[in-house]
Image (cartoon, grey):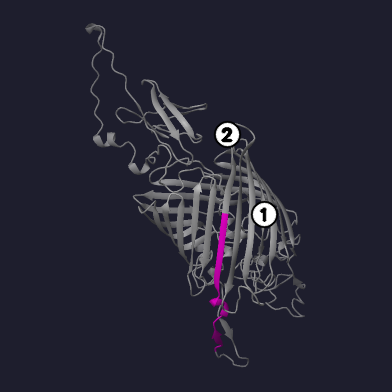
Amino acid sequence: MGIVTNSAKLPVAGATVTAIRVGGGIRATVSGSDGMYSFADLPPGEWTLTAEVEGYPDAAVPPLQVVASKATRHDIVMNVPAAVPPTSPSLAAAPAPAAASPSAATLNQVVPAALQSPEATTGVDTFTPFAFGDFTWLNGSPRNKAPVFDTKFFTPDIRLDVHYMADFNHPRDHTIVGSTESFRSGEFQLEQLSFGGDFHYDNVRARFLTMFGLFATTTPRNDASSGVGQWDLSNAYRYISEANAGYHFDVGHGLNVDAGIFVSYIGLFSYYNYDNWTYQPSYVSSNTPWFFNGLRIQYFPTNTLKIEPWIINGWQSYARFNGHLGFGGQILWQPNENLKLVFNNYGVGQDNLAYQIVTVTPGAGNKPGTVTNNPLAKAERLHTDDSIEFKYYDNKKMNGKGLSKAAFSFTVDAGCESGGGLSCSKGPNKEAFIGFMLYNRFWFDNDLYAITIGGGEMNNPGRYLTLLPPINGATAATGTPYFTENPGQPARMWDATLNIQYMPKQWITWWAEAGFRHSNVPYFAGSGGVTPPTGNNGYPAQYACNDGAPAGTTLTSTSCANDGGVWYPDLRTRQATLSGGVLVKF
């Protein structure tokens, strides 16, 4: 990319810019009215540029080195041809009026500095963290080689995610249970529409990304911290996926200090499906945080290592649950293009929604009850999430329709809650989590196609990380009597996934996926669905009657006797799905 100008530093429009790759390959484009030209899909290698436009002699540029994942900029100057002297004084044309000279400021800067493209990097960038190699193959990372548009001030990020899903349990209310990616069956749905990007100028940083679509409803309902206090935080943050700001210090290979809402990579997979090898990740990813709200510090002592502490409100929570903030961090090491090791740890947070307990003495009239603290408020959560990704084959010549690349990712998670009567290891009040997921991916035909197969398993006694089914509109804050999450209750699940992707351009992915999930307790929506016959009745924390009336939190022999009987959701132990869609990222 670059700007075509003349010797007066004014933009030249309509210039044909041709890029020729040493060893084969050619591209061409035309400069715009502002003189800008760009090539969005140049593969790495050595390229020469030529520019031609009427009224100027052709211009040629010495060979440039294009590096993966880095924007390469070169401005082209078209020199005005020398005037041809007249052959005879009698035939000489009258001199044209002298043109007014552009001001020095105009000549000095055609485009404001903040809106100019970043300075081009020649050769391999060995200073910027992780810029020395091509990591677009990683699970959980976008595969764009370079942004479509970039300036020194702003780099845009635009995402679109549309899909069709079919659950073979055929729930009559079209509701899919047990996932943070799959929500409706038998329908086309918009899962994500996001726009925003990164602001960066004079070491000041900011990022925001909006969130519209299904994610705007499904993500907030999994955060029980909205039940603490007032001001309706779920709606306050509903349409914001990321919003943080901070400062970059020139220490080592970089030090960033940011505050706000930022994405979490506990569970390896990205919150944004475009970045992932499969659409539906396994439980150790789907059931762990997608975002944090707090302070993040990123320190890069070398260009291969990141150390990132967090001070946050809690475990995927807009608010703080109880007395403690959460503390954690990530260590990321990518020593070469083929290997990634990442270690995430979290602790200290008291992440249970634990309302105070009010006891009223029978016959006490209007006397206030006795208020005692809920012991679960003192329970502290610990969690570790550790992953390896390894690319074990890479046909770097990229000269065939066979296998291009092959890689795998492996993640192990373990955690527990203790205190307030809970135990990490034994007893009826055991609260623990252990799980893993393993995926293997093959790329074909110069990365035009990819096939991924994998899955995982989790064991979560106490169910504190098991996603609450949305029975009768239930959320993490309301709970439901139909699927309780009490200490010691079992929840053991496994899944398997086959995903196929077609990637004709680096900005778009068409995908198809088959998945199977199993639970040792009834959990997934069956044909009867998880919605009462008359629709959600507004009382998700209570049992429901068939006519929609609430039936309280405890059933008796007379419950719903005059209301058509007690309604029950149809929960199954198995779920098979077939889905497909399109993902776009600019």
Furthest residue to the bottom? 363
In front: 444, or 475? 444
* Quarter of the rendering containing residue 33: top left
* Residue linked to disc 1: 455
Q: Residues within 10 Å of mark 2 (few under 14, many from 20)?
A: some
Residue range (magenta): 368-387
Work out how far the residue at label 1 is from the one at label 2, CA to CA, in angstroms: 29 Å
- Look at the image and say whether residue 512 sits in the magenta stretch: no
Q: Residues within 10 Å of mark 1 (few under 14, many from 20)?
A: many
Q: SS class of the residue under badge 2?
A: loop
- Which residue is located at x 45 percent, y 45 percent? 131
In front: 109, or 387? 387
Left or right, 256 with respect to 576, comes to: left
* Residue linked to disc 2: 398
- Look at the image and say whether residue 377 sits in the magenta stretch: yes
Type of amino acid under label 1? Gly
